[in-house]
Image (cartoon, rainbow, N blue to C red):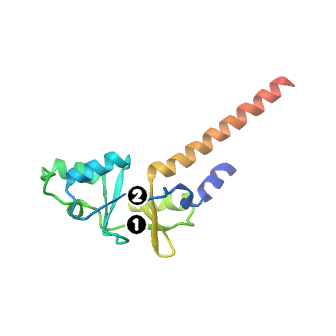
Amino acid sequence: MTDAITASRLPVSALVADTVARIAPGASLLEVADALNGGDVGALVVGEGDAVEGVVSERDLVRALAGRLDPATTRAIDVATTKLVWCDAAAGVGEVATEMLDRYVRHVLVEEDGKLVGVVSARDLLGVYVADDLADDLADDMADDADDRR
């Protein structure tokens, strides 16, 4: 249980990539699909330069296609989520996971000193807890092996 507590206190900044995957607000949904696929990411920040106008995710793309929007002419900003959820880079993984659950979101923007430094996904947070459980299991197995040798 102490490891789970430790994992929940890990700062979310430890999970963010060095770069933020972005797309221009006027990009077509075809360009969004290419960028998601090419970047191997589930969401893109919509905006030019340091501006953040929204986030467009795989789910937004699927909803647009299911709604029969034209992927060649529909713009990223037209389908992007604009009610954004932010957290501080020093926030703990557990705190951010709780915020995701409370707000029903899968991506949270991470800021430091008022500037976007990354995006953390539910999958990123899940990975922290899974890795923690695997480490616990390995430690238990090693302890059992040591006891068996005695």
At x 48%, y 67%, the residue is 87
- Residue 71 point in image, percent of width and height: 16, 51
Q: What type is the residue that disc 1 sits on?
A: Val
In the rendered view, does 141 fall on the left or right side of 55? Answer: right
Indicate the position of residue 55 as horizontal and vertical percent values.
32, 61
Between 35 and 53, the residue placed more toward the observer is 35
The kind of residue on which mark 2 rests is: His
Q: In front: 89, or 95?
A: 89
* Dot 2 or dot 1, earlier in sequence: 1
Query: Disc 2, disc 1: CB below 8 Å?
Result: yes
Neighbours of disc 2 within 10 Å: few (<14), some (14-19), many (20+): many
Instruction: Note whether 120 is above or below 140 in the view shown.
Output: below
**Image quadrant assignment for residue 74:** bottom left
Give the residue number, with chain letter if any, for mark 2: 107
Residue 41 showing in the rendered view = yes
Query: Percent from the top left, x then y, of residue 63?
Result: 22, 51
Q: Secondary structure at mark 2?
A: strand
Residue 48 appears left or right of 150: left
Labelled disc at residue 85:
1
